[in-house]
Amino acid sequence: MAETIADTRRLISKPQNLNDAYGPPSNFLEIDVGNPQTVGVGRGRFTTYEIRVKTNLPIFKLKESTVRRRYSDFEWLRNELERESKVVVPPLPGKALLRQLPFRGDDGIFDDSFIEERKQALEQFINKVAGHPLAQNERCLHMFLQDESRTLPSG
Amino acid sequence: MSFFGFGQSAEVELVLSDAESRRRVEHKTEEGKKEKYFLFYDGETVSGRVILTLKHPNRRLEHQGIKVEFIGQIELYYDRGNHHEFVSLVKDLARPGEFTQSQIFDFEFTHVEKPYESYTGQNVKLRYFLRATVSRRLNDVVKEMDIVVHTLSTYPELNSSIKMEVGIEDCLHIEFEYNKSKYHLKDVIVGKIYFLLVRIKIKHMEIDIIKRETTGTGPNVYHENDTIAKYEIMDGAPVRGESIPIRLFLAGYELTPTMRDINKKFSVRYYLNLVLIDEEERRYFKQQCFALLSLMQLPVAMGRICPRRPLGSPPCPDHGEETFRKAA
């Protein structure tokens, strides 16, 4: 043959430690948004959602945490991230201003199906954001997810 | 002078003296088509003949001189008016005069320097061609014949591997290794990716070959990037301590040798792009430059074997044996 056959044997590599191979992965991060509750009376009413975090990532102070947040808190988080970090932040579900007008046939923003839709979209949003390595370095994300003591500054 | 129509009254043809034996290779044209051209190497003599055929014999053909040129030039597509000739040889074949019958002129350009490889790219073209010109008062009769030149290099003495640890602090640490830094066009890239830390949810990993054609100088530098290959090397989530092998055969892709600052006009470089994609479609990548060479092709005797000839002895033409060069 005109050419020598190329040596395509694999490069030598270290055998994998069995603990690494069969142990739990180091990238476990699960965030659930659930249990919506409407608080307050009359025009001051608003809905809060339970944000439950389970993780083994060392960047999160708590391996498990639960906080309650409302839609405007998500808006605050999104604005902080856009301003402070270089992350391209995904969009939030809509503000539903039309639903807040009076004389509607349904419950407006307290309508069950609307709350369910919004809850799912918020869960997608927060998972996407919290999994981003650069967003994980931002204080605002950890305040939002795990700091139960404070309510977030309103927008 | 012909009163009948505006067609040429003479036809010019260029024929190489070794047209029968010289190898032809495929080369892409500017429009993207593949055509065959005669292959030359640096230092080879270019010889042949110019055949001048009169369309109307017995009618005179007046001319201001006949010459043949061998030209190597670089054309930048955005600056077509200026061709940069780096090789320009001329042979005068006939002084001004007239012909009444067809003529044949032999020519030879001895040991012509052809320093660069022929290249047809996105924004620049480097070509070599013969041009025969019959000068006339109103319009010259011109015939061009393109040839292709390949450069060859020897096996590099030093060809170290590329090994690097890269990543994102506390999120993803990998060590990648490629077995060489200089590959030839039919080579195989053998390597591996070793995961030191995986705190993100990886979905798959691929390796891309990027070709970057750079034209222009100073403030007018223009880079044209082209992804020549995308090759998935891993599907699924890796964990710490895992090693993913890489085996990428280059022969399947349209590659040219790396060209560095050719005549100070353009460069062609290749990069390996290692890309990891996580579950949210975020991309993490590391780009690494590598060199492509066209290697000295070793001629090998191959042909029919005479069954009676002992191994190792010279071939015997009386028994119908042939030897011919086969370049890979």
Image: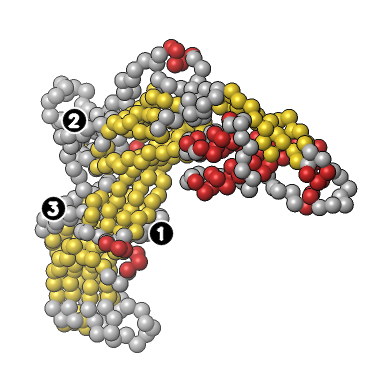
Q: Is tag 2's residue or tag 1's residue first in the polypeptide sequence?
A: 1
- Distance in Å between CA atoms under marks 2 and 1: 48 Å
- Distance in Å between CA atoms under marks 1 and 3: 30 Å
Residues marked 2 and 1, same chain? yes
Q: Chain of mark 2?
A: B
Which tag is nearer the camera, tag 2 or tag 3? Answer: 3
Q: Nearer the viewer, residue B96 or B1?
A: B96
Give the secondary structure at mark 2: helix
- The amino acid pointed to by label 1 is Glu
Q: How many marks do you count on the picture?
A: 3
Reading the image, the residue beneath label 1 is: B31
Q: Nearer the viewer, residue B176 or A139?
A: A139
Q: Is residue A102 above or below residue B205?
A: below
**Residue A34 as seen in the image, left or right of residue A42:** left
Q: Nearer the viewer, residue A137 or A114?
A: A137
Q: Position of residue B256 (x, y in %)?
A: 30, 47
- The amino acid pointed to by label 2 is His
Q: Position of residue B254 (x, y in %)?
A: 36, 45
Do we see residue B106 in this rendering?
Answer: no
Q: Which mark is residue B43?
A: 3
Q: Residue furthest front?
A: A149
Residues marked 1 and 3, same chain? yes
Q: Which mark is residue B319?
A: 2
Quadrant assignment, res B161 = top left
Give the secondary structure at mark 3: loop
- Check disc 1: other Cα within 10 Å, few if <14, some if 14-19, many if 20+: few
Q: Nearer the viewer, residue B306 or A134?
A: A134
Q: Residue at x 17, y 54 (%)?
A: B115
Q: Position of residue A64 (x, y in %)?
A: 59, 23
